Amino acid sequence: MTAGESHGKGLVGIISDYPSGIQIDIDLIDRQLAKRQRGYGRGGRMSIEKDQVDIISGIRKGRSTGSPISFIIKNRDWENWKDIMSIIPEKGIGEKEKNILTPRPGHADLTGMLKYRLTTIRDVIERSSARETAARVCVGAFALSALRILNIDIMSYVDRIGSISLNTDPDISDKALTARIDNSEVRCPDESISKKMMKAIDRAKNNGDSIGGSFKIIAKNIPPGLGSYTEWNRRLDARLALAVMSIPDIKAFEIGRGFKSGSSTGLDFHDEIYYSSDKGFYRKTNNAGGIEGGMTNGENIMIGAVMKPIPTTTKGMKTVHMLSKEESVSLKERSDTCAVPSAAVVGEAVVSIELLNAIQEKFGTDNIDEIMENYNNYKNYIKNI
């Protein structure tokens, strides 16, 4: 669970059922938070904030205790907004900003005001903002700390900005791949394509516009059998879809070659099964993206997501004033031109959270050593089939 507003005092998170006995690397959490803030096309807000986690409970002497973990990520920009965002209804406080009544097409503004009977878009903006994802990146880093003990790792890269895209998928076995992605300002592993993506972002910015794109998330060294076919809400692909689609501005999701599956035949698409004494059961292809029947099949999980252009533009778009009902121009507020690289980092986080949930459902919840024992027993069982 997360709470907090974009320009409030900070973002708060609570993690329940986190296994005890895990050594918590605060530097890892802060590095993941920093990765979310980077990316070509981000707005002026990122020059103000330097997200760092302040853990409140659930960790003692560097290790998780099994108690709920709570934390806060403080907003430095709060100092510039404390009158507007004050929780105290004193005279004069909050009067520096008039009610905002020109909703942005593509944003939560209009429907949020109608749903909650609000009198200003400000009350919608603050919670619907993608700033909330900083808290989920923090939770995802806690999850990643546990997954890495099981030798499971998560990575992401951007494969499209606007009309500029990678021509081929990168070799995910390349040990230098992660460094190339992290060193790219758009999280693209191809240097020449990265430069073209940055130029596309510049063009959008110069036109007072925004630009979208797509990214991939890969989870490696996944055991078979996470998730279940027995109930619809236990299918792991459905839960991963929910997690990724919950990231603001994500409009499409696929696992494996999902978008291409509808134009394929069964003989072309499905991943044939092989067996060897050293590998066990394996596939030579991975069109299914590591999930069949709602369960992991032992191959890498391959996820794709598409992010629409951000609704806030410096030019603004046609809208209607909430009171006068007259044609107007939508709200113009400090924003990003492109947040696709940031969304890819958030994608890593939410996938990490769902995978740890699935791991704990199968191998235990309480303690990391107990989880490891059950996990190793399961791997031995599969190896000896």
Image (tube, rainbow, N blue to C red):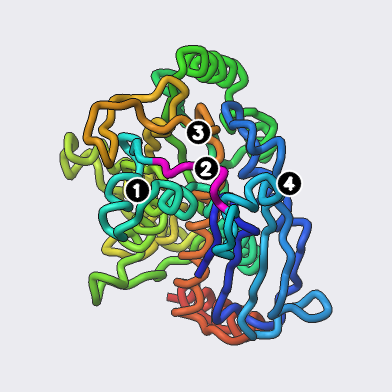
**Vertical order, 141 against 100 (above or below):** below
Examine the structure image and report whether residue 299 is included in the region drawn in magenta. no
The residues bearing labels 2 and 1 have C-alpha atoms spaced at a distance of 44 Å
Say which element carries label 3: loop
Residue at image location 70% in from the left, 84% down from the top: 65
Work out whether residue 295 or residue 134 is closer to the camera in this orientation and state it.
Answer: 134
- Mark 1, mark 4: which one is toward the viewer? 4
Q: Is the magenta stretch mostly helix, strand or loop?
A: loop
- Mark 3, mark 2: which one is toward the viewer? 2
**Vertical order, 123 against 210 (above or below):** below
Say which element carries label 1: strand
In the rendered image, residue 311, in percent from the top left (x then y), is placed at 39, 33
The residues bearing labels 4 and 3 have C-alpha atoms spaced at a distance of 20 Å
Residue 255 circle label? 1
In the rendered image, residue 83, in percent from the top left (x then y), is placed at 62, 51
Q: Mark 2 points at which residue?
A: 97
Q: Residue 220: in sight, yes or no?
A: no
Q: Earlier in the sequence, mark 1 or mark 4?
A: 4
Work out whether residue 375 or residue 214 is closer to the camera in this orientation and state it.
Answer: 214
Q: What stretch is highlighted in magenta?
A: 94-100
The answer to which quarter of the image holds residue 293 is: bottom left
The answer to which quarter of the image holds residue 116 is: bottom left
Residue 294 shown left or right of residue 383 in the figure: left
The residues bearing labels 3 and 1 have C-alpha atoms spaced at a distance of 35 Å
Q: How crowded is mark 4: few (under 14 residues within 10 Å), some or many (20 or more)?
A: some
Q: Earlier in the sequence, mark 4 or mark 3?
A: 4
Work out whether residue 378 or residue 143 is closer to the camera in this orientation and state it.
Answer: 143
**Vertical order, 364 against 173 (above or below):** below
Residue 333 circle label? 3
Q: Mark 4 points at which residue?
A: 50
Residue at image location 49% in from the left, 51% down from the top: 126
